[in-house]
Each structure stands twice: as C-alpha cells, then as structure tokens.
Image (tube, helix red, strand yellow):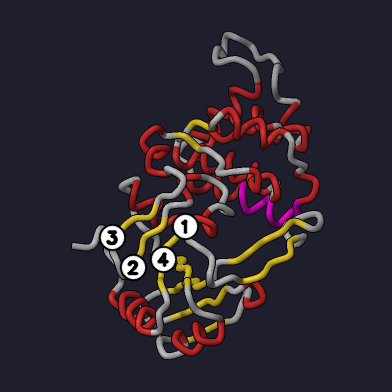
C-alpha cells in the first residue's frame, strides 16, 4: 500500500517517466503536510531525476497543458483537468549577486536526491516521496524535527537567500514550531534589504492568513531581527497601557493578542 494518496494521473506520469529511466519524487509542502497529518494541498511539486529537460517536456506534453514558466530554472507547470503540478529538474545553484535573482542556476539531472534537497531551507521541507518505490526520503532527519516541532535550517546555503528569515517567521506560526537557536543566529546575519516588497508582502500574507496564532510569528520576528526593518512595529514594544483596561501589558503584547483574535 502506498504511504501517500497520489492522484491517478500523477501515478501515470510517474510510470511514463520511469519507462524512460527517470525518477519522480514528490517534494515540498505536500510531503511535509502528509507527515504532519495535515491536509495535503492539490498543487503538487515534483522533481524529476535522470533525464534532460527536452525529454521531460516531451513526456509531460501528453498529459495536459504545459507552461514554461521558470523554464530557465528547469521548472515546468502542468495543468490538467484535475490539478496543477510544478515539475522541475534538480539544479545546481551558486550565489553571485544580491536578491533572489542573484543566482547562477544550472539543471543537473544526474544529481542525487540528497544533494538536491540540501539547497532547501528547512529539514522539514527536505523530505521527499519516491512515486515509483512509494517510500519516503529523509536525508536531513526532517521527520525527527517534525516530531520535535523544531524548525531547523539544513546547512550553510541557507544564508544565500534572506527571504528564508521571513519564511522562518511564517512557518513558526503556521506550524506552531520552535525555531532552532542556530537557525536564529543565521537569520540575524542576513540582510532583508535585498528583498523586494512583493516577496516581503507574500510572506506576511501567509503568516496572517494561514496561521491560527500569528502572534507566534511576530514573537519570533523580534528574535530573528526582522523588526529592525519595520520601525513602526518595533516602536510598539515597551509602550505602556492603562493597567486597569489593559492588564496584558504593553502595546506590542496587545497588538499580538488582537492579531490572534482577527485570525
């Protein structure tokens, strides 16, 4: 019996890839959420190993409408009648400039799953599911960290993208996980000024909309050094309130309680 309930059409795609000596591995939030006993999203991310991009395209074209958004990164979007999938090749990345565009990227179909997963942000997001063998791949002990409810970075490449600081913030709230102290140290060294407003907004949107207790993320935002970039929020800390009407504490504490009620 398969561990994970996979759409029938995705199993057919995996078999077609396998016939051409390729390997399909489900990655990302779907695998993490399954391992946590949460509802698995309909949009699925799949990495294909062992074949080049031209062959991958020729196979996927038979299953639906293929969009070449992110093609230069080896990423293709497939829309079928039932779902939407992102297919990608494992890729080599090297930081050469500022921001999320400052990377040299080269697809490498020969890469091992462990090597490919090492570029992900947190151990809990590095778990894969081999669609042919129907087993979990966990090279960085993400399952252990799920059990411990710990958000932990994988390695030094974490510091290449400052967006990961904001991802730590929103994941801590959405999953209600603690953040590993060493990960917090890494986050404090990163420069969020490299990020676009759109990317910053999207992480705050996920925090406010997807978390039952957004306050958890904002409490960690303080530890992660994020509030330095948002002086309006930082100035709420320590502002006193009338204890008769607000026994909870300062304006910062009050605001976090309001956010939880709003959520």
Q: Decide: few, some or many residues near mark 2? Use Cα within 10 Å; few <14, some 14-19, many ≥20.
A: many
Between the residue at mark 4 and the residue at mark 1, the CA separation in whole angstroms equals: 10 Å
Of discs 3 and 2, which sits in the foreground? 2
Q: Are marks 1 and 2 in contact (CB under 8 Å)?
A: no
Determine which residue is flagged by label 4.
Answer: 25
> Between disc 1 and disc 2, whose residue precedes?
1
Query: Residue 118 in magenta?
Result: no
Q: What element carries label 3?
A: loop
Q: Residue farthest to the left?
A: 1
Q: Within the image, what quadrant is residue 254 found in? A: top right
Choose between 90 and 166: the one closer to the eye: 90
Q: Decide: few, some or many residues near mark 4? Use Cα within 10 Å; few <14, some 14-19, many ≥20.
A: many
Determine which residue is flagged by label 1.
Answer: 28
How far across and down, in percent of the image, does residue 245 sit? 57, 14
Q: In this view, does 64 lie above or below 188?
A: below
How far across and down, in percent of the image, does residue 100 sit? 72, 58
Q: Residue farthest to the top?
A: 244
Q: Main secondary structure of the magenta part?
A: helix
Determine which residue is flagged by label 3.
Answer: 4
Of discs 4 and 3, which sits in the foreground? 4
Quadrant occupied by the N terminus = bottom left
Q: Within the image, what quadrant is residue 232 found in? A: top right
Looking at the image, residue 58 sits to the left or right of residue 36; the answer is right
Q: Residue at x 31, y 75 (%)?
A: 11
Determine which residue is flagged by label 2.
Answer: 131
Q: What stretch is highlighted in magenta?
A: 195-203
Q: Residue at x 69, y 67 (%)?
A: 105
Between the residue at mark 1 and the residue at mark 2, the CA separation in whole angstroms equals: 14 Å
Q: Decide: few, some or many residues near mark 3? Use Cα within 10 Å; few <14, some 14-19, many ≥20.
A: some
């Amino acid at each position: 019996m398969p561990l994970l309930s996979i759409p029938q059409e995705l199993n057919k795609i995996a078999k077609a890839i396998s016939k051409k000596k390729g390997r399909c591995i489900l990655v990302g939030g779907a695998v993490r959420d399954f391992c946590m006993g949460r509802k698995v999203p309909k949009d699925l991310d799949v990495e294909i190993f062992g074949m080049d991009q031209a062959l991958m395209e020729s196979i996927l074209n038979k299953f639906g409408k293929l969009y070449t958004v992110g093609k230069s990164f080896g990423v293709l979007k497939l829309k079928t009648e039932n779902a939407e999938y992102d297919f990608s090749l494992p890729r080599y990345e090297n930081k050469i400039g500022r921001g999320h565009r400052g990377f040299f990227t080269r697809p490498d179909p020969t890469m091992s799953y462990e090597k490919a997963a090492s570029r992900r942000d947190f151990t809990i997001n590095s778990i894969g599911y081999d669609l042919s063998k129907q087993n979990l791949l966990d090279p960085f002990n993400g399952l252990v960290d799920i059990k411990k409810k710990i958000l932990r970075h994988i390695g030094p490449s974490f510091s290449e993208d400052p967006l990961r600081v904001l991802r730590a913030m929103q994941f801590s709230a959405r999953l209600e996980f603690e953040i590993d102290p060493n990960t917090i140290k890494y986050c404090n060294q990163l420069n969020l000024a490299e990020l676009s407003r759109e990317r910053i907004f999207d992480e705050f949107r996920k925090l406010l909309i997807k978390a039952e207790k957004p306050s958890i993320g904002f409490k960690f935002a303080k530890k992660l050094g994020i509030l330095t970039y948002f002086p309006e929020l930082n100035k709420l800390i320590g502002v006193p309130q009338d204890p008769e009407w607000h026994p909870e504490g300062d304006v910062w504490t009050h605001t976090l309680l309001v956010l939880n009620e709003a959520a």
